Image (tube, rainbow, N blue to C red):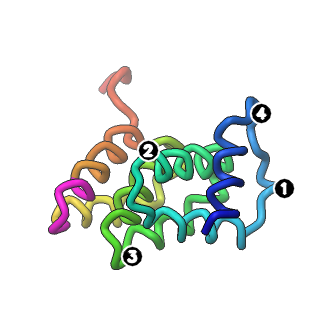
Amino acid sequence: MLPAVLIACSLAASPVQVTTSATDEALIRQLIDAMKDADPDVRGNLANALAKIGPASVEPLTTALKDAVAERRAAAAYTLALIGSPSRTALPTLLDLLKDNDVDVRRQASYAISKIVPTGGGGR
């Protein structure tokens, strides 16, 4: 897990946006797997790294929303919130998480939904 954490920290600290062409599906899965870490700072750094990768992370993060580990579900939801509207395909799963037994999972799912769903501003 340590290499994934180091990569995540490097990506999170990087001022440049990571492009999809530079991403590797195995790396994305490794970063998501590391999201079970008990340290919220580590999970936050991993979330920032995955958010920088962007839309390429959405599908594996949506799968992670169904993980058995609550910390990983919550971190995946938070990361989808950071990605924003490109995460719209995750909305059905996020809505299901509003009934999760873990309060942090429910909290992060509701936060993600609030960041993904567009708000007002339009006419009728």
Span colored in magenta: 100-106
Q: Earlier in the sequence, mark 1 or mark 4?
A: 4
Q: Give x and y (percent) for residue 25.
A: 72, 69
In this view, the mark in front (2 or 3): 3
Q: Nearer the viewer, residue 115 or 123?
A: 115
Distance from the alpha carbon under mark 1 to that under mark 4: 14 Å
Mark 4 is surrounded, within 10 Å at the Cα level, by few (under 14), some (14 to 19) or many (20 or more) other residues, namely: few
Residue where numbered disc 2 is placed: 81
Q: Provide the residue designation for mark 1.
A: 21
Q: Identity of the amino acid at label 1?
A: Ser
Q: CA distance from mark 4 to mark 2?
A: 20 Å
SS of the residue under disc 4: loop
User: At label 2, which amino acid type do we have?
Assistant: Ala
Nearest the eye: 91 or 103: 103
Left or right placement of residue 25 versus residue 116 in this view? right
Give the CA separation, mark 2 to mark 3. Answer: 17 Å
Q: Which mark is residue 16?
A: 4
Does residue 112 sit above or below 24 in this rendering? above
